Image: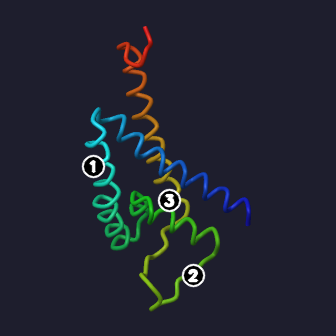
Amino acid sequence: MIPKVVALGVLATLLYTTMPLAMSAILPNRRMAMGLWAAYYIIVGGIFTAIGMVSHTPLGALDLQYGLQSVTMDLFDYKLIPGRGPMLEMMPLTGTLIVIFIQVIAGMGLIWFQVSRDQRTGVGGSS
């Protein structure tokens, strides 16, 4: 059980740090970056949850919370009981992990691009 918990912790850390940092790298203003992150997390995430529930595809994993919840349920063999709380269907584990890792890699790519561009222009104390 411990390796599964550690894997979920690493996955959650990657998601919940990479995406806000990528949005901070895109926008120079802190308020705008926080607004973009909030819009992505709340509005875009809700839209992708609905799309994932209707289409039964891993596209719903673009909502960070829904993707992690689906991976957690699959790793721990948790079965939903009808009538007990919100009914979120589990997405296929492989597809969900692929969508999550694409999202993390895209976020890291944005961060790398912005940092390397700023480094070449002399921002941040480099000469």
Amino acid type, residue under disc 1 in the picture: Gly
- Mark 1 vs 2: CB contact within 8 A: no
Quadrant position of residue 9: bottom right
Amino acid type, residue under disc 3 in the picture: Gly
Badge 2: few (under 14), some or many (20 or more) residues near its Cα, within 10 Å? Answer: few
Point out residue 43 in the picture as x, y percentages from the top left corner: 28, 60
Point out residue 61 in the picture as x, y percentages from the top left corner: 43, 60
Point out residue 91 in the picture as x, y percentages from the top left corner: 48, 68
What is the spatial separation of the Cα atoms under label 3 and label 1, in whole angstroms? 29 Å
Q: Element at badge 2?
A: loop
Kindly report which numbered mark, 3 or 1, lies closer to the viewer in this rendering.
1
Name the quadrant of the N terminus. Answer: bottom right
Quadrant position of residue 122: top left
Badge 3: few (under 14), some or many (20 or more) residues near its Cα, within 10 Å? Answer: some
Q: Earlier in the sequence, mark 3 or mark 1?
A: 1
According to the picture, the residue beneath numbered tag 2 turns out to be 79
Kindly report which numbered mark, 1 or 2, lies closer to the viewer in this rendering.
1
Q: Residue at x 53, y 48 (%)?
A: 14
Q: Earlier in the sequence, mark 1 or mark 2?
A: 1
According to the picture, the residue beneath numbered tag 1 turns out to be 35
